[in-house]
Image (spheres, grey):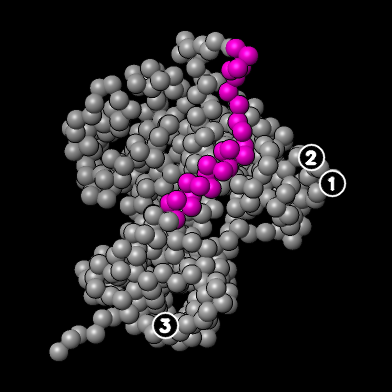
Amino acid sequence: MTTRKRSVVVIGGGPGGYEAALVGAQLGAMVTVIEKEGMGGAAVLTDCVPSKALIATSDFMSRFEAAGRLGVGFDTTELDQHAHADVQQINQRIVRLAKAQSLDIRAQCESAGVQVFDGTGQIVDRGRVYAEGTNGVAREFGADTILVAVGTTPRQLPTAVPDGERILTWQQIYDLPELPKHLIVVGSGVTGAELAHAYLGLGCEVTLVSSRDRVLPGQDADAATVIENVFRRRGMNVLNKSRAVGAERVGDSVVVTLDDGRTVEGSHALLAVGAIPQTEGIGLQAAGVETTASGHIVVDRVSRTSVPGIYAAGDCTGVYPLASVAAMQGRIAMFHALGDAVAPLNLRGVCANIFTDPEIATVGYSMADIDEGKVEARTVTLPLSTNPRAKMRNITDGFVKLFARPGSNTIVGGVVVAPQASELIFPIGIAVQNRLTVDQLASTFSVYPSMTGSITEAARRLHTLES
């Protein structure tokens, strides 16, 4: 007797959706992904991949500016006067890169046996999904398991409506025909800080409007201070404690109004004021799936919603807006739904990164957690200015910070502020995830000279601080 394959329908092809689909197919399920924009979703097509590609281009430009400090000069000729940014070529490359990545993901899924349906999906009940194709053809899919991974969309202000030309969301910047002369970035969270840094590096005048007393208010205070100081030193105009209440287009300019009556005029305004889940109109209420007041789907640590057989993953859950977390939620959902071994989501092991220059990477408990008494930990901070490799590379801004529990001396968190901090945080992430001790990290060989040498040195200093 042949056992019927379990059927899985995934609504949304972003990191949470396509990673879940790959696991589902690997475990023998019949998997369908319904995606309207392209596999990879917004993370690949309009958000994470494009923005990091733009930042990489900006950072490459910055190397020319720093070359003189390393003793490197450039011969100028009529054919090669100086480095400059051609925004049309930059954007065309970014869009091509994103589309290529999307096609690679689709090919990977299809080669694994996943059916990809181009269109939108709506839950009919806990066992059925109605799909309307982009070609006008509709289908209904039966499902033993439904996974919702519909992501988010940029939040808009009623007093600052994007027009796609001068007032922009972060998804619209890749259509710009020329670099902004003066870009006003509204919002100093992760997206705002990253894109403000990118356009500053490309040669734009940038004003960053922050409603809080510092940029990156949700991050390690020491790290945020480093970034803000770097921003100001490189010429960015940072307006702290300045809440934007509106943005209006006036001819070829944009005027941003602040809550104290001041105005800031620029050529373009970029709104980075958060995101809202795309959970309206997909049948959640009719199916009985619980959502929050903000529209996020309530899930537990194995991605279950309030309705048996319906799971959710990614930014639409409001758990942690990172592609890596979305992917892990999707994988966990499939492991659980299809009866494989599964460990609940562990947010303490999440490595997160902000792609400014220098980057900020974090894992585990934060300094705020320690200050608020959520965890008891000893701390050490080691500036990169003492690292020999950093000196060779002319790196003066940044540090390594480690947190360890007293008594057991296990590493419970860390912060790295440095170029490529996204790579340097990994050994600390391994230590946190596997509950390694200060001595285990300190006794691990690091290359000399290397940036990772500061991580082992910080661990050695924690050993000397043992009480």
Q: Residue at x 44, y 58 (%)?
A: 40
Question: Magenta segment range?
Answer: 77-102
Q: Nearer the viewer, mark 1 or mark 3?
A: 3
Regarding residue 216, the answer to whether it shows in the image is: no
Q: Earlier in the sequence, mark 2 or mark 1?
A: 1
- For badge 2, the amino acid type reads Glu
Does the stretch in magenta take in 91? yes
Regarding residue 265, the answer to whether it shows in the image is: yes
Left or right position of 45 against 5: right
Q: Nearer the viewer, mark 3 or mark 2?
A: 3
| Rendering quarter of residue 115 | bottom left
Q: From the image, tell me which residue sits under label 1.
A: 250
Q: Quadrant of the N terminus?
A: bottom left
- For badge 3, the amino acid type reads Phe
Q: Earlier in the sequence, mark 3 or mark 2?
A: 3
Looking at the rendered structure, the secondary structure element under dot 3 is: strand
Say which of 162 and 136 sits in front. 136
